[in-house]
Amino acid sequence: MSAWLAVLVHTPAHASLGPVLTYRHREVLPAGTLVRVPLGARETLGVVWDPADDEASGEIDPSKVRDVSEVLDTVGPLAGAWQQLVRFAARYYQRSAGEVALAALPPQLRELSSLQLQRKALRLHKALGLQPAAGKTSHTKTPPPENAGPARAEVQSKALSAEQTEALAQMVAHSGPFLLFGATGSGKTEVYLQAVEQLLAREPQAQALVMVPEINLTPQLEARFMERFAPQWGPQAVVSLHSGMTPAQRLSAWLAAHQGGARIVLGTRMAVFASMPGLRLIVVDEEHDPSYKSGEGARYSARDLAVYRGRLEGVKVVLGSATPSLESWFHSRPVAQGGRYLRLHMPSRIGAVGRSLPLVRRVDMTHQARNAVVSLPLLEAIKERIARGEQCLVFLNRRGYAPVLHCSDCGWKSACGHCSAFRVFHKSDRTLRCHHCGHSERVPRTCPGCGNPDVLTLGRGTEQIEELLTALLADVRRPGTQSPEQPEGEPVRIGRIDADTTRLKGALQSQLAAVHAGEVDVLVGTQMIAKGHDFRRITLVAAINPDSALFSSDFRAPERLFSLLLQAAGRAGRDAAMGAHSEVWVQTFQPAHPVYAALKNYDYPSFARSQLQEREQAGMPPFSYQALVRADARSQEAAQAFLNAARKRAGSDMAHWPGWAQVLEQVMLYPAVPMSMQRVANVERAQMLVESASRHALQRFLAAWQEVLHTSRGDPACKGLIRWAIDVDPLSI
């Protein structure tokens, strides 16, 4: 007697199949069991799903039902809460449950056999000091291993400030979610550490999930958690989950979390889907960061899913930031005004002397020499810091040497032939590279348009700033480095950290180690060094050209700029002995702009208040809800034709559906327009904004509109359409 099983798989987008297919097996398997099943001519990973789930396919033809190839019974079933998280994410972000679920699982699960997984799990159990059940891996919660660390050393906690103590007390007394609004250097990470420590002291079998926005922030966070918890719980109790890991590392970490052996999971946005049976605490550090929003596939927000998961599983959730997203700030208003989060405030820096935060100086570049890149006052300030043995950070959010090469005779510019963008000049290897499609060419000796040998640069990138500072500081010597070979002392050391200098594995870690060791006097970099790093000897931070973000068409641009500048400012003066004279320099042609005025006073509340007032008047999020429908096609006409056809059908076909007139009245569909980056890799891109004052109405409309979108694809005017996707709660328009 065989049983029929509903199995969730990642079906091809072009197929008419649903994500839940029916397979045959000799016995009934519990929902959440991982299996390998045939799909077409290949085998794929699947998850046994609730047969009552509404994503199941229609009528079943018994002659076409195939057998399950293999049951991965070494891996215990995924919990019901995990399945519900996947269902919600798929429904809310308008993707299939199979796409969400299978993308959340380690890729090696699709490759290893049940026997190979069993061997890997046994090795993992041995490392964790756990006892497997006979024949299979045990999935029961277990106490910490007896052999974890030398003599089971106790966790060594640091003394807390009054603000940290109060924040932790509030976390214990209330259910959350919490918004930990703490100044840079106020000790938010220590609060996370103490919260995890208190949790494990109360519940030794509990698990905590701590998320950071970017991969390059995980090593230093992992080091702090290992230092704090490995002596008592063993090194295997802290694992990381991010896309930079090898498939084998990722599977081991996922299994450790799934089996309950890993007490603490550190990760990027993908970690929000980690299977953790003992989960009791979720921390989302730098919650404002746009990296928590996926830009491809299921375009989910890990921060928002963390809040949902906390409510679903009764888990406490802490969102931390010095510059919270306006949505989180809005949700943390008083309960009487409709707030849903509890705001915890830590305005003071730990161990601050004198001023608690660096002094912000605005340099009006209209009063500097024409075409000046580094103003004279800033240059003198940098020299003073070097003379005192301190470090400086120069921030410019644009890599390469120059964004554009151009010819002044004929007007030629280094445009990319495949994208609506310019190829960036990289002087280090004499190439022109498109940062969107990756196309690279050698720099031409003369202008391709007219043969003019004097091709010039437009704009500046970090490579050029590094070269310029090297020339400007050529006569400056590092203090205390005189020797018989160099009686005047060693020259200033200038380092650069951006996506170009950190491409090789381990490069970022080695460069950061050089900065921490004092081997770099001036650090030049992009936003990858402007947030999250604890540079103890940096006392001056300079923003070279932040004005370009002030006049963007994106309504979120001021919020992003303020956040980025304040995060960069937070790298200065983190050591109490140097913090009293730390400074932040902002070179701008708009010194009176409200963004810079708020930055000077570190007044995020007033900045947020003014921004929220503007958004309320304009009916923008968080006072409305948005979705973008994006279309890729061989021509811009086909992309826009598809979107406009779907828009037209929404107003005609859907208007006649029973009960839908009221829903359509609450939804606004704007005409299709080209995306800001209209063409990438010879693919034309268009978008359509869908907006509503009601989240419920928007979700109902999008779910029903899927059918209309599929139908519109067959319109003759849409020939050449490649793909389309819905982005719910987009971060850029």
Image: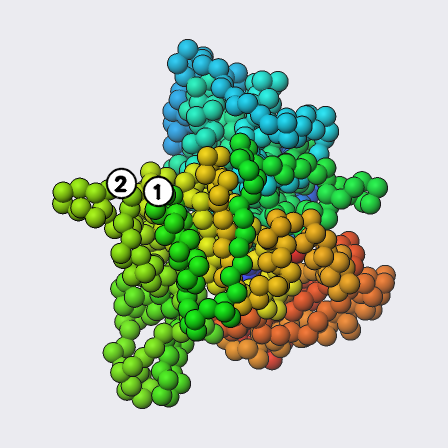
Image coordinates for residue 252, horizontal then vertical, percent: 42, 33
Residue 276 appears in which quarter of the rendering? Answer: top right
Identify the secondary structure beneath mark 1.
Answer: loop
Q: Is residue 226 visible?
A: yes
Disc tally is 2
Q: Is residue 726 visible?
A: no
- Residue lying at 60% horizontally and 53% vertically, measured from the top left: 599
The residue pinned by badge 1 equals 389
The residue pinned by badge 2 equals 480
Mark 1 / mark 2, whichever is N-terminal? 1
- Residue lying at 67% horizontally and 67% vertically, measured from the top left: 689
Q: Amino acid at mark 2?
A: Gly
Identify the secondary structure beneath mark 2.
Answer: loop
Q: Is residue 405 shown above or below 304?
A: below
Crowding near the residue tagged with mark 2, few <14, some 14–19, many ≥20 C-alpha atoms within 10 Å = few
Give residue 621's mark.
Answer: none
Quarter of the picture holding the N terminus: top right
Is 145 in front, or is 357?
Answer: 357
Is 640 in front, or is 612?
Answer: 612
Residue 700 appears in which quarter of the rendering? Answer: bottom right
Q: Is residue 522 left or right of residue 98?
A: left
Q: Is residue 619 shown above or below 340?
A: below
Image coordinates for residue 511, horizontal then vertical, percent: 33, 45
- Residue lying at 50% horizontally and 75% vertically, measured from the top left: 634
- Residue lying at 38% horizontally and 24% vertically, measured from the top left: 123
Q: Are marks 1 and 2 in contact (CB under 8 Å)?
A: yes
Image coordinates for residue 522, horizontal then vertical, percent: 36, 50
Q: Is residue 646 left or right of residue 576?
A: right
**Residue farthest to the left?**
485
Quarter of the picture holding the C terminus: bottom right
